[in-house]
Image (cartoon, grey):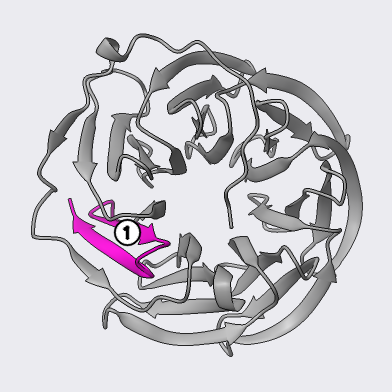
Amino acid sequence: MRRRFSKGSLVAIPAMLLALALAPLWGATPYRIRKVGKAPNFLVLSPDGTKAYVTSYADGRFVEVDLAQNLVARSIEVGSAPLGFALAEGGRTALIACRDSGMLTMVDLETFRIVADVKAGAKPNSVAVDPRGYFAYVVDSGRSNTGVLHIVDIRERNVTGTVRLGSSPFGVAVSPTSEQVFVLMGGTNEVWVVDPGKRAVVAKLPVGDGPDGIAVTPDGKRVFVAGSRTGDLTVIDAELAQVRITLPIGKMPFGVTVSPDGKDVLVVNTSSRTLSMLPTDLSSLAGETFQIDKGSTDVKVSPDNRTIYVLSETGNSIQVISR
């Protein structure tokens, strides 16, 4: 599924500097939304926070969850091995990377029907959308582990350009301010910074072993990358294109998100079965860690910053936590 690792190492700061105290979860007792697909991997919330969307890897479906009713409302077969996805056109369209189908599948979220299948290389695995909503950036790991970043015109529904990548790319994010594209490179344990206008890689930054999750702050100043093999979180200064610090975070971190208010970064530690939370400005390294469900892979925070949603691949469920 989303598991892919590579060898390498990165020296992190001592674990004692990050006091992650296991604590009870916030607010009310968390509850779960069950039967959310089969082996779901990635989670995205609608702009208004009323719905959650999930790629159901094992059965090739895309799932819509009604968060008021706490149940699956609709699902549609989209292609083989759907993985990363993003919302576009004001949250009206889902763009889904279907790895084994080699397609970027576009779903109209009003009618819940497929409106386009765009050929996106050999093995597309992740998608991000530029802040203006004109282009999607699709990471393709390729047939021989030499990857490509495809630039897709969302309105025209076709590939308008490509950028050659290195070995085993998996994961992508876009700055909401500079439009720089950040791609996780599993083969070299780096983040590659792509200028989509020049269609060129402009920087290569070292991160932890097995980079998987990535998130950018709303102001575009910081990028956070989870190293799944080294159990750390690398903090990148996006404006300077420099690594600021690497923090021990938990065992096998995968999903990373920044709260909509930009104050907190949250990391799912799959093997630890914990959720770590730190201030994005690093004003304190005394983070908090909370117990979550087995097999969790992704996390998102509601638009009002009051609710956390944690996706469990093995439980086929979403854990709902009130802050």
Q: Quadrant of residue 80?
A: bottom right
- The residue tagged 1 is 309
Residue 176, above or below 44: above
Q: Residues within 10 Å of mark 1 (few under 14, many from 20)?
A: many
Which residues are the magenta region? 303-323
Q: Where is residue 226 drawn, in percent x and y?
A: 49, 33
Considering depth in this image, is 1 or 110 the residue closer to the camera? 1
Look at 38% across and 60% down and name the residue there: 311
**Is-magenta flag for residue 44?**
no
Residue 75, above or below 184: below
Q: In which quarter of the image is residue 34?
A: bottom left
**Is-magenta flag for residue 316?**
yes
Q: Where is residue 188 drawn, in percent x and y?
A: 72, 26
Considering depth in this image, is 297 or 261 the residue closer to the camera? 297
Q: Quadrant of the N terminus?
A: bottom right
Judged left or right of residue 156, residue 203 is: left
Q: Where is residue 207 drawn, in percent x and y?
A: 58, 22
Judged left or right of residue 220, residue 77 is: right
Look at 66% across and 67% down and name the residue there: 95
What is the secondary structure assignment of the residue under circle 1?
A: strand
Three-letter code for the amino acid on which mark 1 is drawn: Tyr
Considering depth in this image, is 228 or 286 the residue closer to the camera? 228
Q: In which quarter of the image is residue 157?
A: bottom right
